[in-house]
Amino acid sequence: AMNAKKQYGIPFSVTWHGSDIHTAPWNSYSDRKKITEIIKSADINYFVSNALCKLSDKLVRTNNKKVLHNGCDRRFIKYNDSERQRLRDEFHVSDKIVLSFAGNLIDIKNVLLLPQIFEIVHKHIANTVLWVFGSGKLKHQMEESSKKLPVVFWGDKSPDKMPDFLNCTNLLLLPSKNEGLPLVLVEALNCGCKAVGSNVGGIKEIIGAENVVNYPSNDFVEKFAEKVIYRLSSNEQTAEFETNDDFSWEHANLIEDSDIKRFI
């Protein structure tokens, strides 16, 4: 797209989602040089979170940047009480408090800390279980660390099934080392879950400052577990995102349509 603009004058935009800004430029000089060139050349650079946009300023400061959150699939909604209870009965967790993680089982997601965090929570709240959704090279290590804990590894599940699982989940865990805008948090909140995450990337923009834990820190596991225990004992919802249009595709499309018209 950049070369097409140089040769033919065709405008182009770029959407930056996460690792292309928070990881790649800092691990490779050639990547950093090319990404900086693309940002400078684009007519508009969209960033999926304020945090990601701010981080991009460390590469290059330009006036062609805009924050545009991803939208959430409308299948992710909170079911009625009877349907939620039916699903909890089906999954044999009617008398359990369900914690969940959904994502790639890789280092950037900090998944090796999940068994440690859950062990502390489980000691305080005995009827908790942990559901893990996803696959990745760290799965075996996680399984080994979780042998004595009530942890279920579901593997990869299709997006159309995830609303059912999230409607059975009481709280979603996301202890990532870095993020762009983790849409799974929006999906979880829309399904009625609470959430706790690390204070990186756009996580705080979704679940609020009161539900994040600073990372890195020497006592991160303990602080994260404490936050989870507190949130489980609280009657307050994490946030009311059903009314937040920033995380809808309709909002995203309106913004993009208005920008495209500037080029026509």
Image (tube, rainbow, N blue to C red):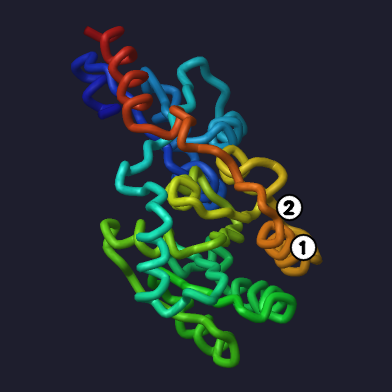
Q: Residue placed at 47% from the left, 31% from the top?
A: 243
Please report contact status of discs 2 and 1: CB closer than 8 Å, yes or no.
yes
Separation of residues labelled 2 and 1 (CA atoms):
9 Å
In the figure, 134 relative to 153: above or below?
Answer: above
Q: Position of residue 135 (x, y in %)?
A: 38, 72
Q: 3 or 115: which is nearer to us?
A: 115
Any mark on residue 214, and which? Answer: 2
Farthest residue toward the bottom?
148
- Residue closest to the eye, 237 or 70: 237
- Name the residue at 36% across, 19% down: 255
Q: Image check: 263 left or right of 116?
A: left
Identify residue type, mark 1.
Answer: Lys
* Mark 1 secondary-structure assignment: helix
Per the image, label 2 sits on a secondary structure element best described as loop
What's the mark number on residue 138?
none
Q: Residues within 10 Å of mark 1 (few under 14, many from 20)?
A: some
Q: In terms of sequence position, does the residue under pointer 2 or pointer 1 come before the other? A: 2
Q: Picture quarter containing residue 262? A: top left
Callout count: 2
Q: Nearer the viewer, residue 96 or 69?
A: 96
Quadrant of image for the C terminus: top left
* Mark number displayed over residue 223: 1
Q: Which residue appears at 72% of the width and 81% of the height?
A: 123
- Relative depth, front residue between 122 and 33: 122
Q: Is residue 30 visible?
A: no
